[in-house]
Image (cartoon, rainbow, N blue to C red):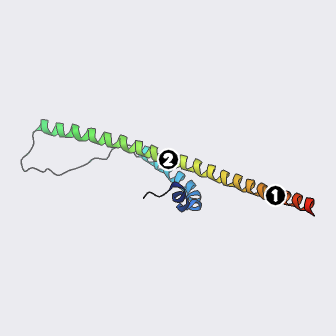
Amino acid sequence: MAIPWLSALKVIPWGDVISHAPTVLEKARDLMSRKSADAAPQPMATPNAHDEVPSLGELKNRLLTVTMQIDELQQRQTQLTQTVSELAEQNAALVSAVSSLRQTVRWMLGGLVLAFVGVGALVLRTYV
């Protein structure tokens, strides 16, 4: 049986989410700036798995393959870092929107209470 969305949303500690949203956004931005500064690839040394010495052509092919794999991994990492940053910004915007909606609901609830008090006073005045 699936959990209804409303009860699932009630379980989330929104106060903690709201309080930690700026920190998450700041850390994501720090990660983005740090990764762009560390863009220089690090040399990787791997031991030779074979006892025999491979030919120069084979070594060049391996080097090309590994270089392409490293470039692809760096691109993926950059994309993932950008995605995390965008998600953190969206989370901060969502938290801000939820906070303003909470405030609006509080104001509306206060207005509703005042309206009920006013209607109650009018009803009492007409019957008394």
Q: What's the residue type where badge 2 is placed? A: Leu
Residue highlighted by disc 1: 114
**Residue 76 vs residue 18, the one in the foreground:** 18
Q: Is residue 19 left or right of residue 116?
A: left
**Residue 70 vs residue 83, the one in the foreground:** 83
**Residue 126 vs residue 46, the one in the foreground:** 126
Q: Is residue 98 above or below residue 76?
A: below
Displayed quadrant of residue 109: bottom right
Residue 28's spot in the image, x, y percent?
49, 50
Residue 66's spot in the image, x, y percent?
24, 41
Q: Earlier in the sequence, mark 2 or mark 1?
A: 2
Residue highlighted by disc 2: 87
Label 2 to label 1, Cα distance in Å? 40 Å
- Residue drawn 22% across the image and 39% down it: 65
Q: Is residue 105 left or right of residue 17?
A: right
Q: Quadrant of the N terminus?
A: bottom left
- Residue drawn 50% across the image and 44% down it: 86
